[in-house]
Amino acid sequence: MKYRELAGIVAIVSVLAILSGCGGGSSSVSSPGPFNYPQTVSDARAMMQAALKSSGAPSATIGLFAGNRVVWTEAFGMIDKANNVPATQSTMFAIGSTSKLIAGMAVMKLVDQGKLNLDTPLVNYLPNFKMASPEYTQVTVRMLVSHTAGFPGGDYRNDVTYGAPELDYDAQAQQTLATERFKYRPGKMPIYCNQCFGMIDPLVAAVSDEHSYTKFVEDEIFTPLGMTHSQFADAPFQAGSFAPSYLLDPNAPDPQLYTNNYPAGAVYSTPDDMGHVAIMLMNGGQYGGSQILSAAAVAEMGRDQTADLPFNPVPAETFGLGWDDVSYAGLAAVGVRGWDKPGGTVGYVTQFIVAPDAQLAVIVTGVSFSLSSPFGASYTVAEHTMLEALAESGRIPAIPKPLPNTPLPEQTPTDAQLAQIVGNYADFKGLFQVAAGSDRTLTISQYSGGAWLPKPMATGLKFRIDGTFSADTAPNISYRALNAGGQGYLVQRNPQLTGNYLVQSIIGERVQPAAPISPAWLNRVGKYWLIVNEDAPSAHLVVDSVRFTLYAVDSLPGYVFAGSTVIPSSIVDPSVSDTVAQMFLQIPSISGRDLNDVLIESHGGEEWVRYGSTLYRPQTTVPVLPSGASTVTIGGQGYAEWRQVPAVGSVAISGATAWKLYGPNLTTPPVNSGTGDGTAPVSTAGSYLILFGAPNAAINVNVAVQ
């Protein structure tokens, strides 16, 4: 999964002047002889120490690679804070979506072997692949690896689990796709898509001799590249071999995290091992005297797959095959070709940059301290380290300076120019409103918690001579309207990371008011449903919301907004029918990712909600547990059962495979949880208990009132 939306990071956090901080665990520098980038290493080490100190992240690693060698790798911080166990060079970190690069390599290895053709329809290799839309026969292998297949986005149910893997996730994801329709016509535009990469798992299994995606990668990539400290999270790791996150308790390591979409995000690795990947890619597919990939395969991975798509009016990301950018803006700004693949999963953030012509590569991986404060510095540290290495080696004159904050001359916008940009805009996770004041300046607000809140640095936006709107206080962050494909869009241009370049991207699609929603949908607005088919180890039950809600916005009639465990406020169109509200946004790149239809289903005379493959039951009809002993029976489909605990006291459970206790407001993490039998105190009346068990299992619950 990809955490790329770190807009607003424009500087290096003033880290070069700070030399103290978290201690390093271990480091290595290549033997004397070749140029070893001493200033780059020194400054990057200081940046890493300072970044960990300022973010609170417990551990992180970095690596610098040149040509065919590892220049420097180092680990920082602790993997066990209570016992002062440091991270080392052999400590594995979850690299999240950087795993997609490995998936791209696996596909191209099979192309080299003559077992795959990128432009052959997927159904030719997987005859059982299908979707609700007939266009599924048009999906090709290339579309999977370049984020252009048109899938809704991701099947997030059970995709990330704590303590145990979800071994049936691949089958679940294929079943989900079989019921879903396309977000857009296959091959039309690039939109980041975890579902696309998920289908690489059964594809590789079907055509490879190993009949397993993970085994193929281990045999054809990890082993020949000498990646001895790289593994898929498909089984428990040896204690102390990996860096745990500290999201649930800042003083105790979290259980091992499993990302169950193997091609999209399941690899744990080290900088040294990923350095072997970089060396191979920088040398035309060769490593250690062996040709791992053909030079043609490496070149095709590094070719812009989005350049000839029918719709891509603002090419914010130039997807390669596995790469997010094959003309990485941070290097393009200094005239250097760069490939990059950031990555993130729950509790981990990675940035991997390769400059193939300059023969340099950098990777930074860190553990998050909290969901609200991820180790986002990994992006900035990686970019700055690459730029400094380029400067130190003489490939660029110097590290570029941040752009000056000088406003462009302003002009008065016409009524037509204001009308073109004023209005409501939606992306995959929210709603923006652009409003004009009496002084003809703009304010951009975001809808949150029932109110419009001004977007940071987006008030007092003046019309400039280049046709954009920006504030005097933040002149490098600008906005403009765009009409393309018969639709209006809001485009933002802003500095990135080290602050010496601007990137523009579409951040919202214009949404016009529509006819009022039907009485059936109006009756659902403001109600809550509780998740029932997420498995007990799911991280979403611990770090997200267990509730789903539907709400409407008065200033934008005709639509419903759906909030789930992953996507907080995605807009849907309920005019289709009284039981289906459809996704409809078509925004290239990140802002159009992860959309789903909302389906209303009848279960036992109640209206349940299905969003993607996740199913929710009404909160208002959750039975209240009586005092004393009672029995809760799991239904034949195995859905989890919810009960409300009416009073302060304690609750004892026996016969369940797992259980979790939440407070009355159902916020996460749960106040208590367990596997098997257990007892938990209930400190607040009206708390909620979720029980997991096998189909038709009888679970005994005893409520003791204080």
Image (spheres, rainbow, N blue to C red):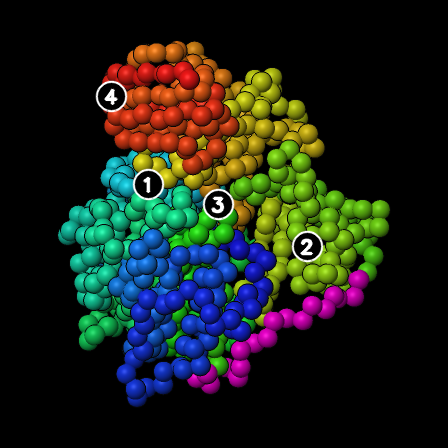
Predominant SS of the magenta segment: loop
Q: Is disc 2 placed on a helix, strand or loop?
A: loop
**On screen, residue 699 above or below 567:** above
Q: Is disc 3 placed on a helix, strand or loop?
A: loop
Residue 672 placement: quadrant: top left
Q: Position of residue 163 (x, y in %)?
A: 28, 41
The amino acid sitting under disc 2 is Met
**Alpha-carbon span between mark 3 and mark 2:** 25 Å
Which is nearer the N-term, disc 1 or disc 4? 1
The amino acid sitting under disc 3 is Arg
Q: Mark 4 points at which residue?
A: 655
Which is nearer the N-term, disc 4 or disc 2? 2
Q: Mark 3 points at which residue?
A: 593
Residue extending farthest to the left is 209
Q: Where is residue 182 in the image (x, y as percent from the top left)?
A: 44, 38
Q: Position of residue 700 (x, y in %)?
A: 28, 16
Q: Is disc 1 placed on a helix, strand or loop?
A: strand
**Alpha-carbon span between mark 3 and mark 1:** 22 Å
